[in-house]
Amino acid sequence: MSRLLRIYKPFLGAGLQEATTYRGNWFFGLIGEVMACFVSYFIWKAVFLSSGNEAMNGFTMPQMTVYIFLIFLTSLLIGSGGTYDVGEEIRDGSIAMRMIKPISYNATFLFQELGNKIMTVCILVLPLVIGVEIVRTILTGSVQFNILQFLVYILSCVFAYLINFFFNICFGFIAFIIKYLWGANMMKNCIVGFLSGNVIPLAFLPNAVEKVFLLLPFSSLNYTPVMIYMGMYTGKELLFYLGLQLFWALFFWGLSKFLWVTASKRLCVQGG
Amino acid sequence: MKQIKRALKMHRIFVAQELKRMMEYKGDFIIGMIGFLLIQTSNLLFLTLVFSNIPSLMGWDYTEVVFIYGFSLIPKGIDHLLFDNLWSIGHFTVRKGDFDKYLTRPINTLFHVMVEKLQIDALGEFIMGVALVCITIPKLQIEWSIAKVLLILLVIPFATLIYTGIKIATAAIAFWIKRSGNIIYMFYMVNDFAKYPVSIYNNLVKTIITYVIPFAFTAYYPAYYFLTGEAPLFNIGMPMLISTAIVALSIFIWNKGIAAYESAGS
């Protein structure tokens, strides 16, 4: 364990350094994303006002508000850029340098990204959670915060991050087939965004579609943690979805290993 | 006149060069276009799912909302298609010191940057916008007149230049701080508000998207005029006025930036 830490600590540090160097840029990007949250907030507000119903598909307006901002928070926590890291290295051939080093390919990315995330977590989680809780308390009239639920949410986020990380690594290998990573990544983000409940809560979809989507790996990314935070999953259901998350995390971990071995065999780098 | 002729000729050369590059990577073009089509489809699915729960959104019915949405994609798509290179100025050209290349050439830097690349993927956005507008128009009760059609066609280039102007001004910030990619992004994201009827927002947001970062003039106001025929002076005149002002201001900022520019080269 301590050996592991000694090897990968520099990567952690490099990630953190990267994040702090361009913090201005990071901050402005963040505001852009918060704006998108407000767009959905206003649309939903108009929708609820127009419908005249208290609740829609099990969501009330306060719950929808909480949902929008929790999805945002969760996306920040579990976001992963593995597709680019892997894809670019395959494209420019620097992946060859990775192969001659006696360290794990996945682990270097993982630690670098975790280092990058430290800043996000430190600066954003507390204010966002407090903000969501204040809004929740005002809107519903009573304190809704439940420490146990919150801890399960964090656990669920860890699973979700691992799924996302390994899924993105796997997807990065697409660079062997498609050289246009930006376009491929955009396509992936769009599909994953819809399947994971980023665009609309899965409960708004037709029943049969919702059932299928809930079993796919993507609902395990954003939707499951948010549902847990909001207390929509309890008891057996909660255990089932956590188990499903663990299954998908292991699945993509295995797949990334498999792809790495396969890729190492057929990799052909031009020039140097 | 001679200058314009020369600029047009340069533009042709650049575009031809881009098209050659694109033919080399046909697959990329298809992937990018499908990507943009997918994004729009996902937003449309969102609208459809939402409207399956409500008869109308604050008085706007499904067809009208889709029309406004589709209309918003047209100027956005054109700007995206023609002037996407401004993003790279903000993200990396200045930071990596590559901007020097523009300064050493005997054409205007801004012109060069703008015509250098064609983001053909954006056709996905543009086609979707045109398709949505064409599909919704027969279902809308619109009073037709030649003047109306002409005004709408006339306002599109001005609406496009609102996007372009905002991108030029924010990209130029990179001349002072080296990296402004996410500042462009921040301003650009405001356009999301303008895709939906402005009446659903509170007064603060309304004021911002009308007078501060005036994206509402790229879609909602012209589309509103088209739907109702009301207040052409405001709904069509203002976009033109504002667009001209923004472009003038952004060119001014760009030139100031060029003067302040110090190469980051290594």
Image (cartoon, coloured by chain):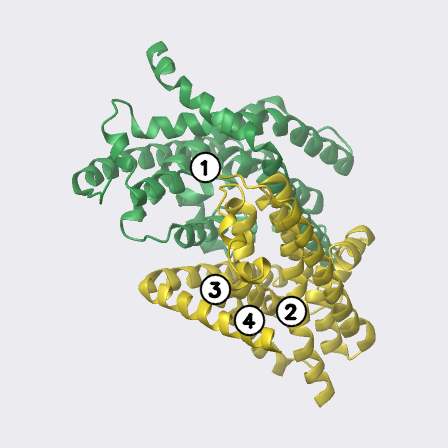
Chain colours: A green, B yellow
Q: Secondary structure at mark 2?
A: helix
Q: Are marks 4 and 1 on the same chain?
A: no
Amino acid type assigned to the residue bearing label 3 in the image? Leu
In depth, the one of B3 and B232 nearer the eye is: B3
B190 is higher (above) or lower (below) than A69: below
Q: Is residue B231 visible?
A: no
For the residues labelled 4 and 1, the Cα–Cα distance comes to 43 Å
Decide: is B242 above or below A251.
below
Residue depicted at 60% across the width and 49% down the height = B185
Query: Can residue A165 be seen in this snapshot?
Result: yes
Q: Chain of mark 1?
A: A
Residue A127 pos. (x, y %)? 68, 28
Whether residue B261 is situated above or below residue B103 in the rendered picture: above
Residue B7 - label: 4
The subunit carrying tag 4 is B
Q: Which mark is residue A80?
A: 1
Identity, as a three-letter code, of the amino acid under mark 4 = Ala
Whole-percent x and y of residue B40? 53, 62
Q: CA distance from mark 2 to mark 3?
A: 34 Å
Judged left or right of residue A96, residue B32 is right
Task: Single out the mark in the foreground, 2 or 3.
Answer: 3
Q: Residues within 10 Å of mark 3 (few under 14, many from 20)?
A: many
Distance from the alpha carbon under mark 3 to that under mark 1:
29 Å
Query: What is the CA distance from the residue labelled 4 to the residue labelled 3?
Result: 16 Å
Q: Amino acid at mark 1?
A: Ser
Front of the two marks 2 and 1:
1
For disc 4, the neighbor class at 10 Å (few under 14, some 14 to 19, many from 20) is some
State the residue in front, B263 or A72.
Answer: B263
- Residue density around tag 2, few if under 14, some if 14–19, many if 20 or more, within 10 Å: some
Above/below status of B52 relative to B261: below
Ranked by sequence position, the earlier of labels 4 and 3 is 4
In the rendered image, which residue does mark 2 sit on? Answer: B62
